[in-house]
Image (cartoon, rainbow, N blue to C red):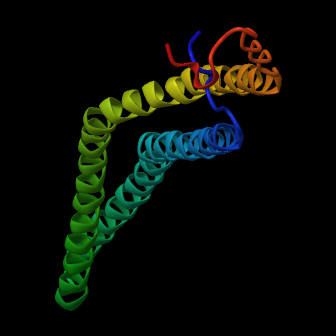
Amino acid sequence: MAPRAQVKSVDAIDAFRAALVVYASQARAALDEVSADAQRTRTWLENDQRLVWERELRRRLRALEQAQQELFSARLSNWQTDSDLRRMMEQRARRSVEQAQEKLRLLQRWSRDFEGRAQPLVKETEKLHTLLSHDLVQAAAYLRDVVRTLSAYAEIQPPAAPAPPADAPPGGGA
């Protein structure tokens, strides 16, 4: 008969299972936060900032139109000093419009770049989230079953050794 395994304690396996459950829980929370951050950044780029700069561009275009009208009026009145001042204001408004248009172009490029760079990483985090939500849960359940099985095994008393026959020589030699 094979000797019995010396299972004295399953505490280490049980402690590892508990640590695994805690790790899976914390890692899932961290991955959820990363996914939420990526979504918030995408929304910020595609919606929030786009709307801000479109609104700002419209405001600046109105200011440019007004500056152009004032410049036209100053030219008609033939006031040179007023005309020069209005020309500078019109140029400043034009540069402001160009800056807003550049911001919108940059925002569109950043949105495309963000999708191209972030999407593969988001997919990887989704794979890891699946692993944490499915595989580690199964591993914890398996370890729980291992602890139960080994605990039950440790409680089984070994069968008593058979008594040597009465006519056998002492020391078991031949």
Q: Position of residue 19 (x, y in %)?
A: 64, 45
The answer to which quarter of the image holds residue 4 is top right
The residue sitting at 43% across, 40% down in the picture is 46
Along the line of sight, the residue nearer the viewer: 82 or 107: 107
Asked if residue 55 is positioned above or below residue 32 in the image, the reply reads below
The residue sitting at 59% across, 24% down in the picture is 139
Q: Position of residue 22 (x, y in %)?
A: 67, 44
In the image as oriented, which residue stretches furthest toward the bottom?
Answer: 81
Query: How many numbered discs, if any?
Result: 0
| Relative to 155, 56 lies left or right | left
Along the line of sight, the residue nearer the viewer: 147 or 75: 147
Along the line of sight, the residue nearer the viewer: 50 or 81: 50
The answer to which quarter of the image holds residue 97 is bottom left
Q: Position of residue 48 (x, y in %)?
A: 50, 48
| Relative to 80, 65 lies left or right | right
Asked if residue 171 is positioned above or below residue 65 in the image, the reply reads above
| Relative to 10, 129 lies left or right | left
Quadrant showing the N terminus:
top right
Asked if residue 145 is positioned above or below residue 49 in the image, the reply reads above
| Relative to 87, 9 lies left or right | right
The residue sitting at 69% across, 22% down in the picture is 141
The residue sitting at 43% across, 57% down in the picture is 56
Q: Position of residue 153 (x, y in %)?
A: 75, 21
